[in-house]
Image (spheres, grey):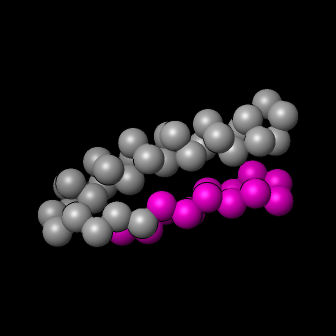
Amino acid sequence: MSLYQFERDEMTAIYTGRPQKDQALSEALVLGRLAAARLVAANGG
């Protein structure tokens, strides 16, 4: 599973390799929230 987020000129990419779809989704959501917070902070907000 891959998750991409963009904010202005910044991008995060999350890749999960869990064999079960529910595990991959859960992991991607947790990591995505962390990455989103870092994107906001990197862009002054």
User: Number of numbered discs present?
Assistant: 0
Residue at 52% over, 40% down:
34
Pick the front one: 3 or 15: 15
Rendering coords of residue 10 (x, y %): 76, 57
Furthest residue in direction top, as rendered: 45
- Counting from the top left corner in percent of width and height, residue 41 is at 73, 35
Quadrant the N terminus occupies: bottom left
As drawn, 9 above or below 30 = below
- Give residue 4's position: percent from left, percent from top: 56, 63
User: Residue 33 placed where, x, y %?
Assistant: 50, 40
The magenta-colored residue range is 1-14
Q: Is residue 26 left or right of residue 44?
A: left
Drawn side of residue 32 relative to residue 5, left or right: left
Q: Residue at x 32, y 50 (%)?
A: 27
Placement of 1 over or under 23, stated as above or below: below
| Predominant SS along the magenta part | strand
Q: Is residue 25 magenta?
A: no
Residue at horizontal 69%, vertical 45%? 39
Q: In the picture, residue 6 is in which quadrant? A: bottom right
Q: Quick one: quadrant of the C terminus?
A: top right
- Magenta includes 11? yes
